[in-house]
Structure formats: C-alpha cells, structure tokens
Image: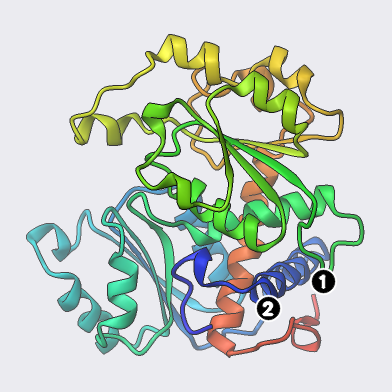
C-alpha cells in the first residue's frame, strides 16, 4: 500500500491490518501515551481545498501524536486562491520536503492525479474528493462498528453484520467508501434513499437498495444504521432541487425516536458529521445512548494515526513493540 486513495483498492487483509493497527493506536491513547516517537523528523502536509472540521483536525492531531511536523495548507489564504495549479502546488510541497500529503478536494479524482502524475514521491492520502471517496471516514466507521458489534475484534472482519445506510447517497463520498469497504469486510449493506438521491450506476455497487426506511428497518433488522448528511450545498451548486422537500424527507427518511425504537436493542447509530439536526436525524436520536457519533470522531484520530504509521513506515504487519513507548 503506497497511497490511500479509495476503499476499493483495499484487500480484506489490508483493511483488517489498518483496523488492528488502529486498535493498537487507540490503546496507546487510552494508556495516556500522548505522543509516540514513530514519525519524528517527518513532515506531513494537510492540503485542504474544501472546508473540514473533523478530518483536518484529526489528521493534524494524529500526525502530532506520532511526533511528525505538520504543515496546514488551505486554499483560502494561499496562492491556490490566485489560481496556482495542482501541479505547481505539488512541486512546491516536494521542494519543501513533504513526506506525506493529505488532500481534500472538491474534484473527484484529484488525489489520484496527485498520487500518479509523478509530481511527488510521497504517499498521498485522500481526505475526501468530490462525491467519490473518503477512505479514512469509512475506516473509522468500520472500526467503530467492529468495536461495538464484534466480540474479540482483533484480526476479525465484519462478516455477518447488517448495515443500513440512509439518505443523500447521490452526493456522498462517505456512502461510496463505506459500501465498498463494508462489502470487502463481509458485511451486508442496504442503502435507503429516495430515487432522486441515488447516483446513476448504483446497480453495480455491492449492496441492496430500498426506497422505504421503515420497510428496510423491519426487513433487515440492522446491527448498525448510518445516517448521511443531506448535502444541500452540492444541490444548489449543481442547479438541482431538493426533492422530496425537507419536511417530506424528514418524515420519510429521518431517524427520530419512533424509528430508533424499531431497531434491534443492540443496534448502534452512526453519522459522519456534520449533522443537520432536525433534517436527517433528530436531536434525541443523535444524543441517544445508542449513538456512537462522538466516539466516531475519537476513533478518527486512531485510524489516521494507523494510516500514517503504515504508509510512512512501510510496515505490513500490525505495530507491536515500536508503539510501546514510555509515558
Ligand atoms: N466527516 C467529515 O468528513 O467531516 P469534516 O467535513 O468536518 O471533515
């Protein structure tokens, strides 16, 4: 694994290795080993062309907890806003000695271009590109599900779990990344959305499709339900309307206390954030004891530590002794 661009590139063994390494990173944090020396002297660049709260901050935290130096580079306030190309930006980062580049970009495929055009020698990590992929989000979601739903999870995948993902699949890189990763890990995925919020070509995705949330909950009896953010900003910029209307959407596809009560007792609730409270998820569902939404953010740091560790050290086995640093 030289780069992390898409969950479709991950084999089952690679995905399990990342989840196992995440568990070890999380264990160091639980032991209050705040900083590991693993990436001392390395420089990680956060290259964000689109806004982010969770992903950017957690990559920065992850890199710092591994003792790397971090350069934060956002489109606003840099020469990108003067029209500098991706190629010239990449050459500048190379000249500055970047050892890894984390990129979020509004264009699907931008991380792939950065990784394969020959402008950089460093590993490239996709932090979300257009409507295409968000691999570290899917990995932190899978890690969170494994922690809650798989007894003795180390070395295990998600075989036999039933996951329902609900909402604006059309604009969601999180949905696409999750469907492929969860399928690779052996879970059965059902997407639930209005037909207007499903992308062309959805039939080829390795999942089932339903247009009715209540029917899907009753039929699937999911172990986990993931609510997607309705991406109203992408709807207005593409000239498309929002159909069904927000009120109708909440009635048909929103997760509220009534639907929460229909889920199996052990089922957990996920949302990648940021949430539209009152639209795709009610406040009582978001804040319920079944919600693992805040824990997803915590797990995001450990997942990103694992990805940086594996890509920058070239390790192909889960970390062991190198993580046993003193407090
Ligand atoms: N889930 C996620 O990608 O959130 P941010 O946009 O805040 O990074």
Query: In this orientation, which residue lies closer to the viewer: 164 or 81?
Result: 164
Vertical side of 77 occupied by 297: above or below:
above
Please tell me which residue is depicted at 76% across the width and 57% down the height of the picture.
158
Q: Nearer the viewer, residue 68 or 121?
A: 121
Q: Nearer the viewer, mark 2 or mark 1?
A: 1
Q: Earlier in the sequence, mark 2 or mark 1?
A: 2
- Quick check: 284 above or below 75? above
- Crowd band around label 2 with a 10 angstrom C-alpha radius: few (<14), some (14–19), many (20+): many
Secondary structure under the numbered disc 2 in the rendered image = loop
- Taking 256 as reference, is 263 above or below it? below
Estimate the x, y position of residue 38 in percent, counting from the top left. Answer: 64, 85
Q: Is residue 248 above or below residue 228?
A: above
Residue in the picture at 43% in, 43% down? 172
- Judging depth in this view, the residue of 30 and 233 nearest the camera is 233
Which image quadrant is residue 282 in?
top right
User: Does residue 209 show up?
Assistant: yes
Q: Quadrant of residue 237?
A: top left
Q: Is residue 33 left or right of residue 249?
A: right
Q: Alpha carbon of mark 2 to alpha carbon of mark 1: how far?
A: 23 Å
Residue 68: x %, y % from top left: 52, 79
Q: Which residue is mark 1?
A: 155
Label 1 secondary element: loop
Task: Please provide percent x and percent y for residue 246.
Answer: 41, 15
Residue with the mark numbered 2: 36
Q: Residue furthest front?
A: 203
The residue positioned 15% from the left and 77% from the top of the image is 88
| Neighbour tally class for label 1: few under 14, some 14-19, many 20 plus, Cα within 10 Å | few
């Amino acid at each position: 694994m030289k780069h992390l661009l898409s969950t479709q590139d991950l084999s089952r063994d690679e995905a399990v290795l990342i989840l196992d390494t995440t568990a070890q990173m999380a264990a160091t944090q639980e032991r209050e080993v705040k900083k590991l020396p693993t990436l001392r002297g390395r420089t990680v660049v956060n290259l964000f062309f689109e806004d982010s709260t969770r992903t950017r901050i957690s990559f920065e935290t992850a890199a710092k907890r591994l003792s790397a130096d971090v350069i934060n580079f956002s489109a606003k306030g840099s020469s990108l806003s003067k029209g500098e190309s991706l190629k010239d930006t990449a050459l500048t980062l190379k000249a500055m000695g970047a050892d890894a580049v984390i990129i979020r970009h509004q264009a699907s495929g931008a991380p792939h271009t950065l990784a394969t055009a020959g402008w950089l020698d460093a590993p490239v990590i996709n932090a979300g590109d257009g409507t295409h992929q968000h691999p570290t989000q899917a990995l932190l979601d899978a890690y969170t599900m494994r922690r809650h739903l798989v007894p003795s999870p180390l070395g295990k995948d998600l075989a036999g779990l039933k996951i329902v993902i609900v909402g604006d699949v059309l604009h969601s890189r999180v949905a696409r990344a999750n469907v492929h990763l969860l399928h690779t890990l052996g879970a059965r995925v059902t997407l639930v959305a209005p037909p207007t919020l499903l992308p062309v070509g959805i039939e080829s995705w390795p999942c089932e499709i339903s247009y009715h949330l209540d029917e899907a909950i009753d039929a699937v009896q999911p172990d986990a339900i993931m609510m997607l953010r309705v991406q109203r900003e992408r709807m207005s910029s593409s000239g498309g309307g929002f159909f069904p209307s927000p009120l109708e959407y909440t009635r048909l596809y929103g997760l509220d206390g009534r639907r929460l009560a229909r889920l199996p007792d052990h089922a957990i609730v996920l949302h990648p954030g940021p949430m539209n409270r009152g639209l795709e998820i009610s406040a009582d569902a978001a804040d319920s004891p079944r919600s693992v939404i805040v824990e997803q953010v915590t797990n995001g740091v450990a997942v990103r530590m694992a990805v940086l560790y594996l890509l920058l050290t070239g390790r192909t086995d889960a970390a062991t002794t190198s993580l046993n640093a003193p407090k």
